[in-house]
Image: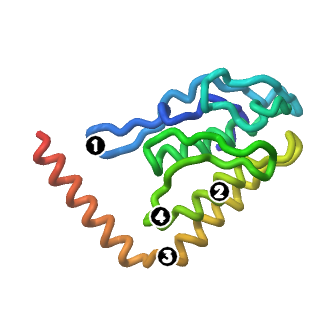
Amino acid sequence: MITRKIDPNWDKDALISNDTFVVKVIDWGRAIDMMHMKGQTFKGSAGTEDFDSPEMIDGRPWNYQADYFGFAATMAVVVTAKYGKLAGGKVGEYSLSCDIKRRNIFRNTIFDIINLLLNIESVHTFSDWSEAIQQFADFWETNFDGSSWREAIAKFNEVCELAATNHN
């Protein structure tokens, strides 16, 4: 479902893990309902260090770019468990400085997607979500075998059940 809401406060604090080994998304912070404000742009910053999108830092107008930045920053936090630092000084050069280990097989794909989402030329052009999804899908099909994946999930579930049993 598309909500057409801007949430410039999408950050690592929106993710928690509970005792049942499930990640839940919480606290999306403030959001702007864009359904009634088609074509509206904004200027200014989020006001939270390390959570301003490149557009906010550059003083350029923005609308959904804050969400793209928030998704990229959250993806970096999920992978590294740390906040990434925005690097670069102009469109085409922006990236998140984050330490994704070389042994992480998703490393290049994640960096590619982060760079795609951070380097949006204007409020009239957007990064293509389907391109990011396709990058993950292509990587998945190339690098994972379905039967091995099912086996790994079964082992993971066994460990979770054992941990849950020992926790009680």
Residue pictured at 53% horizontal, 70% vertical: 140
Choose between 82 and 37: the one closer to the eye. Answer: 82
Report the amino acid beneath label 1.
Thr
Q: Which mark is residue 102?
A: 4
- Kindly indicate whether the residue at mark 1 contacts the one at mark 4 (C-beta within 8 angstroms): no
Choose between 16 and 60: the one closer to the eye. Answer: 60
How much space separates mark 1 and mark 3, taking CA atoms? 28 Å
How much space separates mark 3 and mark 4, taking CA atoms? 16 Å
Report the amino acid beneath label 4.
Arg
In the image, residue 122 sits, relative to residue 147, either above or below, namely: above
Numbered disc 3: secondary structure: helix
- Quarter of the image where the C terminus is located: top left
Numbered disc 1: secondary structure: loop
Q: Which residue is mark 2?
A: 113
Q: Which residue is mark 1?
A: 20
- Quarter of the image where the N terminus is located: top right
Residue pictured at 64% horizontal, 52% vertical: 114
Q: Which residue is mark 3?
A: 143
Report the amino acid beneath label 3.
Asn
Numbered disc 2: secondary structure: helix
Residue pictured at 71% horizontal, 61% vertical: 131
In the image, residue 163 sits, relative to residue 16, either above or below, namely: below
- Kindly indicate whether the residue at mark 4 contacts the one at mark 3 (C-beta within 8 angstroms): no
How much space separates mark 4 and mark 1, taking CA atoms? 29 Å
How much space separates mark 4 and mark 2, taking CA atoms? 16 Å
Report the amino acid beneath label 2.
Ile
Q: Earlier in the sequence, mark 3 or mark 4?
A: 4
Choose between 88 and 133: the one closer to the eye. Answer: 88
162 with respect to 79 (left or right) = left
- Kindly indicate whether the residue at mark 3 contacts the one at mark 1 (C-beta within 8 angstroms): no
